[in-house]
Amino acid sequence: MASPGLRPRTGDVPIPTLTGVNRAVHDIVECIEENFPSYIVDERKIGFSVFDIIKAGSLGHGTSVEGNYDLDLVVYSSEISASDVCRSEDHFKPWLKRIHHFLENNLEGFKFEKLKQRSLQFDYHHPSCVIKVDLLVSPHCDSCEDFYQFLKYIPKNKRELFTVCSSRWQVEFMRRQPPAVKNYIRRAKKWRDDAWPEAEGGEGRPSSYLITLLVIMAFNIAKSRRGSFAEELIGLVHREKLNVHWGRRCSKIQDMKCRFYKPSEQIELLPSRPRVVDPANPANNVWISGIAGYKPGERAGNYDGGDGNHQPLLDKIRTITLYFSSLQL
């Protein structure tokens, strides 16, 4: 807590509260849904249809760490061709550029930061807060069954690209998790943020989503064995043939609640270990895609792909025990 004698300096950026962030998200989504599809510039149609907008990342998953809100917005459109995206990863950029043009001219408080291969990064200066946003676009897929069949018949090196398509099922997966698990996830993310400060840069930083899946699995194992959560998590990270998927560890009731794909489908597209299978996209090995280096001040996204450098995580993981000493399963 700040000392009563300290006063904020003029011009300080307010720290977002969850209420303020949700208001900001509402305004961004409303602006896009109501005005973007019909957006025209010089008689040229810039806008495209919006099937849905999903609040993903930590905010959408209900696992935000106070003061560090991870906001991913995914815009689904039936006009975005999955086949075209598959042919060229750069295909995302034209769609992102169109939304960038719209937001720059229609969303008061929009401040552009960076256009990446898969996302538009910007700051949004809302009256209640200033937040950092990663906006992504995605083809719309009717069901996870259709999505799975699509993944089976595209080149292996293109499958991870479509993780953004499964964002809505990731959100649904997290909605089914009990509050106790989410509390553990928040603590693990706080450890990650302390161990890899974004302002300093570093190597081998685990993504929020990798942290989330490892915590859920370690929580379920520790609960069934009545053991130490932290030790189970450390054991998972150090396991040479790590095998995290969603069909055997949980009880049958919990298993059916958490599962979108059959057990055989969860491992068919990722036959090799170590693996942490994305419950929403069985072609996404989060053990690989969820680890990456970053530059000082650079945002670490959940959809950028990883580099598989796990050594920093292996070196630091034992320090996580300090963050769970007061929690009981």
Image (cartoon, rainbow, N blue to C red):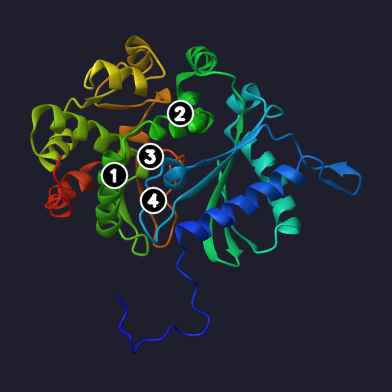
Q: Are marks 3 and 1 in contact (CB under 8 Å)?
A: no
Q: Is residue 115 left or right of residue 259?
A: right
The span from disc 3 to disc 2 (Cα, nearest Å) is: 10 Å
Q: Callout 2, which amino acid? A: Glu
The disc placed on residue 306 is: 3
> Looking at the figure, which quarter contains the C terminus?
top left
Query: At which x and y percent is residue 297?
Result: 42, 62
Query: At which x and y percent is residue 291?
Result: 33, 42
Of badges 2 and 4, the one in the foreground is 4
Q: Callout 1, which amino acid? A: Ile
Sequence-first tag of 1 and 2? 2
Q: Are marks 1 and 2 in contact (CB under 8 Å)?
A: no
Sequence-first tag of 3 and 1? 1
> Looking at the figure, which quarter contains the N terminus?
bottom left
The disc placed on residue 160 is: 2
Residue 202 vs residue 255, the one in the foreground: 255
Task: Identify the residue shown where x is 51% and y is 33%.
Answer: 164
The span from disc 4 to disc 1 (Cα, nearest Å) is: 9 Å
Q: Are marks 3 and 2 in contact (CB under 8 Å)?
A: no
Q: Callout 3, which amino acid? A: Gly
The disc placed on residue 64 is: 4
SS category of the residue bearing label 3: loop
The span from disc 1 to disc 2 (Cα, nearest Å) is: 24 Å
The span from disc 2 to disc 4 (Cα, nearest Å) is: 25 Å
Residue 309 seen by the camera: no
SS category of the residue bearing label 1: helix
SS category of the residue bearing label 2: helix
Sequence-first tag of 2 and 4? 4
The residue wearing badge 1 is 185
Of badges 3 and 1, the one in the foreground is 1
Residue 171 seen by the camera: yes
